[in-house]
Image (cartoon, coloured by chain):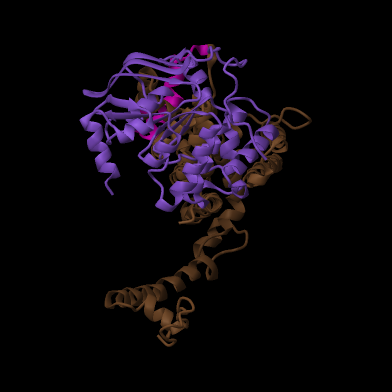
Chain colours: A purple, B brown
Amino acid sequence: MTVDTRPRPAAGSDGPATAPGDPIIQIQGLNKWYGDFHVLKDVDLSVDQGEKIVVCGPSGSGKSTLIRCVNALEEHQKGKLLVEGIEVKNDLKNIDAIRREVGMVFQQFNLFPHLTVMDNLCLAPVWVRRTPRREAEATAMQLLERVKIPEQADKYPGQLSGGQQQRVAIARALCMRPKIMLFDEPTSALDPEMIKEVLDVMIELAEEGMTMVVVTHEMGFAEKVANRVIFMDQGEIVEQAPPSEFFSNPRSERTRQFLGQILSH
Amino acid sequence: MTDRIETGQVTGPPRAPTGAIRWLRENLFNTWYNSLLTLVIVWAGFNIVPAMVDWLVLEAVWHAAPPEACREAAGACWAFLHEKGRFILFGLYPYDEQWRPTLAVALALGLIAVSGDRRSWGRWLAIAWALGIVAIALLIRGGALGLSYVPNNQWGGLPLTLGLSIVGLVFAFPAGILLALGRRSDMPAVKAVCVAYIELIRGVPLITVLFMASLLIPLFLPQELSIDKLLRAQIGLIMFAAAYLAEVVRGGLQAIPRGQYEAADALGLTYWQKMRLIILPQALTIAIPPLVNTFIGFIKDTSLVVIIGLFDLLGATKSALSEAGWRPMYKEGYLFIALIYFVICYSLSKYSQALESRLETGRRARR
């Protein structure tokens, strides 16, 4: 069984229309501070519909903070951030509208441990989208088949392996039929032998045309899937280029150093 | 060890040694100080237990008898309970109508017992509770369907203790949850009010709260708006318990990792959906032991209403003991209500343990 996890047409009944070709995420002059610490410095970025962006950089470079600003898990203090033409600011109504369109996968999975896998998946469609329970369960089951663990539907997250949990987390985000998927180091908490099963699911998703912004150090994934690789350091975007160019011919010295470090072994 | 495992033949953990003597040696006489403790306890047991049995059973007056008969006996005077037991259990409630509170208590305990089983949760249980509460109120208060009216200054004993406890917890628990959420709120005004309330109430003894509820509130309220004594005491108890429960719930809330909040936010759940569906179910499960601790403490604390002149279990017992002739029987009286309190609190504790292990097995991690 195949499921349509492709983003719904941009001119859908819920959510403002975006003309084709318009960027789905627009970031201009974004600044963020934690106290006195300047985490994001004048970040500009625009992501087109269907584009796959891989963000990498040393820890503390602000890459996670950047994607967490996109669905307002972090507040930014200066600059403009538009998702689907809706401006992200401290306005609860806007934030809810944006979060419905943006799925997020976390490093630590963040599944709800008191709910079964099935209930984890159905929760948001039923409560946020008001989907009838039966319909939500059917979609959830199809998505579990997509991530290849339909037999785990009635288990609790604590009974699954890390890789299985992360695949459930991806399915949970997809249940809301988001137009954009954000991945915050989705494989960093996994044992090595489980990384591939998660990346495979992400590659399939990319092939279907999902707009994806992925913070990761999996350079193989970046090479295979990304339209653009972005390198961040100290709160700035240092370099962005298609993967072929990025890996073979990095322009900045800092990028070269970073690549040297993570690709050396 | 008797059974040896030969190398290369590992089949499972070695069998645990059995036998009474081995058990004794390992548990009671494994070190010199444990041996000493065991001997002291055995010696004390030999000295205390026979005297206890003598007083409680063998030398006790079991039949109905006047207080004079007890004075000659060396043991407990259970005749006191023959005479005053019903007064202790029901207070000033009219003697011939005491089947009504009995039935009401049975009804309440039945409903609680059924609700303790999660499988019964549903629409029918809600209807049963609604009908049950009406029936209980009707039975206790009367004044309709041919039942005579009994004003609430005649309510007393066990039904009053249970009523104050159950109604108190039913209102204080949600109030405590709201206070805990308020204390962790991002809204400064809400947070300040909740913190002030919790700290103020926790900084004051329950007796003071009860006195204030019973003496001060009427002073401030206009004459025509008088609330009766029982209701004032109930409000005081609720206010007090809510502050303590709020801190227990807050402890549970703090144990929930930030990722749970973020995952709920990222899925677009509203604040109340997030709290009700994700955060509170986990926080309250974690908080079951301290919650039950507070519940049990609260049930026993209701006995303090005695100081504002309500005849709960303790009040009725004190009153029964104030009667000429029965005054020396306080040991029997207090033992009797201690037993009642123990049964209530121990069953609550047992239920919470069962609940905990059931919630635990549902989601046990594989590791």
Dividing the image into 4 quarters, which one contains the N terminus of chain A? top right
Camera-side residue: B255 or B65? B255
Q: Position of residue B322 (x, y in %)?
A: 49, 45
Residue A129 x %, y %: 60, 25
- Residue B206: within the magenta? yes
Q: Quadrant of residue A128?
A: top right
Residue at the image point whose x is 48% and y is 76% from the top: B12
Residue B355 x, y percent position in the rendering: 55, 50
Q: Is residue B359 above or below residue B64?
A: above
Secondary structure of the magenta portion, mostly?
helix
Image coords of residue B216 (percent x, y): 42, 21
Q: Quadrant of residue A36?
A: top left
Query: As rendered, which of A203 and B355 lies closer to the eye?
Result: A203
The front one of A191 and A54 is A54
Evaluate whether residue B40 shows in this view: yes
Front residue of A91 and A213 = A213
Does the magenta portion include B46? no
Residue range (magenta): B199-223
Count every numbered label the image shows and give the total: 0
Question: With respect to residue B38, does A241 lie above or below?
Answer: above
Q: Is residue B259 above or below residue B330?
A: above
